[in-house]
Image (spheres, rainbow, N blue to C red):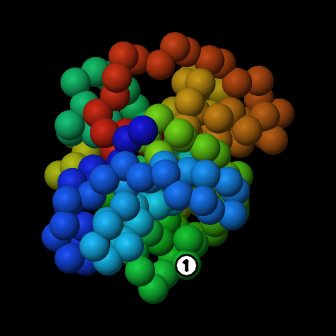
């Protein structure tokens, strides 16, 4: 549903139209350009996320509040991949850019869908250390004992729950706050 909205063809600037066409999976309506045949596939965007375990702070987990959010939601560090980097390089870069922390080790937790944002979340457990200095995107952070973290039932909440479960901790669930800002992968 969400994601980029295209009104005009990025190739030839003709106005796009919803047109049904026969594809491998059957007839499918998409935004298409009648002039040059460009198609807006609207594939989900990969988003990287990290459960940051602080190696030098007793194994506490860092969650941060996005400056653009109105509520008091603390979430995983997330970010988009850059061209030319691996997912591991991308999440290590995002953790460094957003918190100044250096990642010692990464392990994939899992891949999670987040259809409301037309995203797919690739979640890592990141062991990190160093002084914390947040990017301007983030308003504040908190360090939590893993057993005190609450998971919401969407996006990265499931990644956190899987990570906790793998450590023998039964996840605690909370309701999602109403309508987080775009980009809030959680
Ligand atoms: Zn076109």
Answer left or right for 11 relative to 83: left
Q: Position of residue 22 (x, y in %)?
A: 60, 59
| Residue shown at the point (32%, 77%) measured from the top left | 36
Answer left or right for 149 relative to 140: right
Q: Residues within 10 Å of mark 1 (few under 14, many from 20)?
A: few
| Residue shown at the point (31%, 39%) measured from the top left | 182
Up-down relation of residue 136 to residue 108 (above or below): above
Q: Position of residue 59 (x, y in %)?
A: 60, 46
Q: Is residue 131 visible?
A: no
Task: Give whichever of 159, 41 is nearer the camera.
Answer: 41
Residue 138 found in image quarter? top left
* Residue under numbered circle 1: 86
Quadrant (top left, top right, bottom left, bottom right) of the N terminus: top left
Residue 97 found in image quarter? bottom left
Q: Position of residue 161 (x, y in %)?
A: 68, 33
Q: Position of residue 13 (x, y in %)?
A: 16, 70
| Residue shown at the point (77%, 24%) measured from the top left | 170
Up-down relation of residue 70 to residue 35 (above or below): above
User: Does dot 1 land on a helix, a strand or a loop?
Assistant: loop
Task: Give whichever of 180, 171 is nearer the camera.
Answer: 180
Q: Is residue 14 visible?
A: yes
Residue extending furthest toward the bottom: 84
Residue 86 found in image quarter? bottom right
Give the total number of marks visible in the rendering.
1
Answer left or right for 130 relative to 134: right
For label 1, being within 8 Å of ligand 1 is answered no
């Amino acid at each position: 549903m969400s994601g980029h909205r295209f009104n005009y063809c990025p190739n030839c600037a003709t106005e796009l139209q919803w047109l049904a066409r026969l594809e491998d999976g059957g007839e499918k309506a998409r935004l298409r350009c009648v002039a040059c045949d460009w198609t807006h596939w609207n594939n989900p965007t990969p988003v990287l996320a990290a459960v940051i375990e602080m190696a030098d702070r007793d194994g506490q987990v860092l969650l941060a509040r996005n400056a653009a959010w109105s509520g008091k939601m603390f979430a995983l560090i997330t970010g988009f991949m850059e061209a030319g980097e691996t997912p591991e390089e991308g999440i290590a870069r995002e953790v460094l850019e957003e918190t100044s922390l250096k990642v010692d080790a990464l392990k994939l937790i899992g891949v999670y869908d987040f259809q409301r944002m037309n995203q797919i979340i690739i979640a890592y457990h990141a062991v990190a250390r160093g002084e914390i200095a947040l990017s301007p995107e983030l308003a504040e952070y908190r360090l939590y004992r893993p057993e005190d973290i609450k998971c919401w039932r969407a996006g990265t909440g499931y990644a956190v729950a899987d990570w906790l479960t793998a450590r023998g901790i039964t996840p605690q669930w909370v309701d999602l706050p109403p309508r987080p800002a775009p980009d809030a992968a959680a």
